[in-house]
Every structure is written in C-alpha cells, then in structure tokens.
Amino acid sequence: MDHFPIGCWTYFPLSEVWPDFVRDYCDLGFTRPMTPVFTEEDDPDVMLELLDEFHRLGMQAVLFDNRVTAYSLKGADDALIREKFARSLAEFGDHPAVTGFYVGDEPDANDAELFFRVARIQREMAPNLIPFLNLFPWLDAAEAHLGTDAYAPYLDRAATEGNLAQIGYDCYTQMWEGDSGYDVYFDNLREMRDAARRHNIPFCSTLLCTGHNDYACPGRNDIRWQISTAAALGARALTYFYPVGIESGENYQEFPINAFKERSASYNALSEENRLFLARHGSILLRLTCEKSEFTKKAYGGLSLFAPDDGLTAAYNTKDLNMLVSTFRDAEGRRYRVVVNMDREKNFRAKLAFAPGIRASRLHWGKRWVDCKLDASGVPSFWLSPGQMEIFREE
C-alpha cells in the first residue's frame, strides 16, 4: 500500500458492526485500522465479508483474531501457538486486506517473553504480514512494569526476540495541561525513532482522539499537532485511541463515533486532519529517514535546541514561539527539513535561513516542489497554523 498507515484500536465484537462501519472508518482517513474482535463463536464468512469491504474501499486492516492473541495463548507451547495460528492464516491470512494480526498490548515483565514469542512465530509463519504488538511507554511506572531501568534495551529486546517488522507504543501525556506532559511524549518518540533506526524497521505511534482519565479531549489543533510532531520524529505509521464509544465507561468523552454508532461533533476534525496529512505529506515521509529533531526555544524529551549546520543556519518566527525542526534524508542522500509550529493556539510566520548556495523548495500538496516565498531580506518565509507542518527540500 502506498498510503501512509493510519489506523485505530477497535475493541468491540464483530456482532456490533453496523452497516456503514467500514465507510465510517474510511471517511476518517484510516488506511490501516484494526478490525472488530473475532472470537471462536464467530462465523469466518462474516469477517471475510468485512475484509472484502475494506479491500473495496482501498484499505488494509490489522486482524483482531482473539484466538491467537498473546492473552489467549498464555500457557501455550510453540506447537499449540503454531497450530492455532495456522488455522487463522488458512481462514484470513491470504486476504488482500489483511496486513497482519493483533498480538497484544503493553506486556509487562511477566508476559514479555510470551508476547515476543507469539510475534516471532507469526512472523516465521507469515513473513509477508506485520504482527501488531503495542508496547508500554516509558512513564514513571515503567521500570516496575517492564522490569528494566532503561527503555532502549527493552525496545531492542522486543525488536530482536519478537523479530518485529514494526515497533510501536502509545503515549497520551501530550494531552495533559499545558506542556506538562511534553517531556514524556517526546522522550518516547525519540526512543522509538532511535530503536526503529537501530533495527531498520518503522515505528508506529498511537495518538489520542478521545478524552479520558486526566487527558483532555483533543480538538482539531491538538489532532494536527499530534500528527505533525509524531511524523516529524520519524513515525511511519499512526494509530488512534480510541474512535468508537460502544459501551464506553469511566469518563471517556467526545468519541468521533459515539456510543450510538453515529458520527459525532469531533468526527469531522479527525477526518479532515488525517486526510490533509495523507494528501500533503504522508507519501513522501514514507520514503525519508529522520536524522535529528531540534526545538528553537525550549527542548523536550532529551532532544536538543536548534544548532546551525552546513545547510540551515537559522530557524525562527515572528512571535518568538517554539518550533520543532527535523532533518530527514531520502535514499539518494538529499536533505529535507520538516518544520512544525509547536504552539496549539497561535499562528505565526516562520522563517528558515539556508546557507549560501542552497536553494530550498517547499512541498505543495504532496505533488510538486515550489519555490519558497522570500521576505525582504531574502529568507524563506511562510505562515504556520497551530501544529502545522511543512516540508522543505534542499538543492
């Protein structure tokens, strides 16, 4: 698939699917969502019909087959894991909409070996598929939960023992008040980016689309900001928690698809921002590798403040607000700069000063490169909305 993978968690049973379910997901800009939960009691033909609809609309899916998740395989030896997965592969594995099977979520120290083993066996039996395993983020409770005093060795263990084709995690502290959760958010992005680079695999970042616990309800600017910052740190897949409010509890609020299976007030914001990202930036970012990410005013998560290099000598804006500036390269070695407005409320005019002899062009709607508009001093200048991202190529 040429589309940037954008998906979501889907926890409700297959029996809860409504007539417009796949269309509702498609119109949200999802290109690789998770299917509803398939259980031993379900009819495979019902899931196959759903997969046919995904395929017809140009989407792929992570198959949530509850029979072969790590949770359901506790105590199973390798032979039993292979036996059960062989049946699932026979029923669903060859369908063109299936991109992989769901392994599990946030294994702790006691379950890690099983989760990694299940992912490894899935990869061995279906090397063309991508097992979906979501890892616990590095939070205050991470050391006790994961049984390690550092995140990087744990990520290396997951990638190696699981023979992962993709590494991923979830983190929502970006939706705490103000910037109080930014250090945790960017620390996780940085760790994931570096692990993905060490093991030459993509990483998936789970973003928040529904408020709950102490996480605020994301508005449109928040959604744009999350997409832009994750992509600017090198994420090559995104997924959302959690778009559908069927039988929701606690203090969950503002699901894009509400408890009555209706498109809610927040649906359009998520839909438009996902589709704008796909149209403007998604395709090229799949072909680029992130080398470094820096902030212009205040650094978070172990990243650095901006330092001039031989291509970009300055990055600033008219309101002296924080920006995220990342450097990428393509397979031919060409250099790209990705710039994000870190403010979630204010617009500003950003400026990039390139070294003499370097001509910079801006990506226009993912289709062509255009000359940058210059200010009176000859510096490329452009407006950014809250959380907006722009991509520039050096020549």
Image (spheres, grey):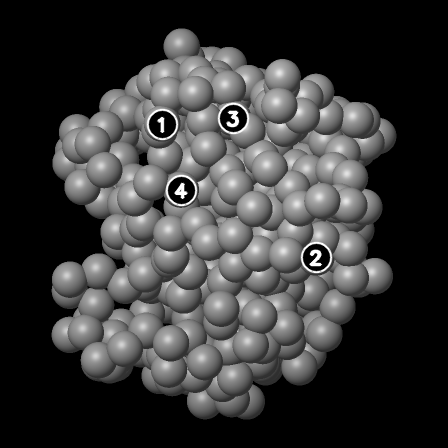
Specify the label residue 329 is tagged with. Answer: 2
- Residue 246 showing in the rendered view: no
Q: What's under tag 1, amino acid-wise?
A: Asp
Look at mark 3 in the image and give the residue it sits on.
350
* Amino acid at dot 3: Ala
Helix, strand or loop at label 2? It is strand
For marks 4 and 2, the one nearer the N-term is 4
Chain-order first, disc 4 or disc 3? 4
Kindly identify the residue that appears in the image at 49 percent across and 85 percent down: 161
Q: Residue at x 55, y 89 (%)?
A: 79
Task: Name the element at disc 1.
Answer: loop
- Mark 1: give few (<14), some (14-19) or many (20+) Cα within 10 Å: few
Label 1, label 4: how far apart the Cα atoms are: 9 Å
In the displayed structure, does residue 369 sit left or right of residue 34? right
Image location (x, y in percent) of residue 103? 48, 65
The alpha-carbon separation of the residues under discs 4 and 3 comes to: 11 Å
Which residue sits at x=45%, y=80%? 156
| Image location of residue 289, percent across then percent down | 65, 59
Circle 2 crowding by C-alpha within 10 Å: few under 14, some 14–19, many from 20? some
Label 4 sits on a secondary structure element that is loop
How far separated are the C-alphas under marks 4 and 2? Answer: 21 Å
- Look at the numbered disc 3 and give the secondary structure of its residue: strand
Name the mark nearer the viewer: 1 or 2: 1
- What residue would you read off at disc 4? 296
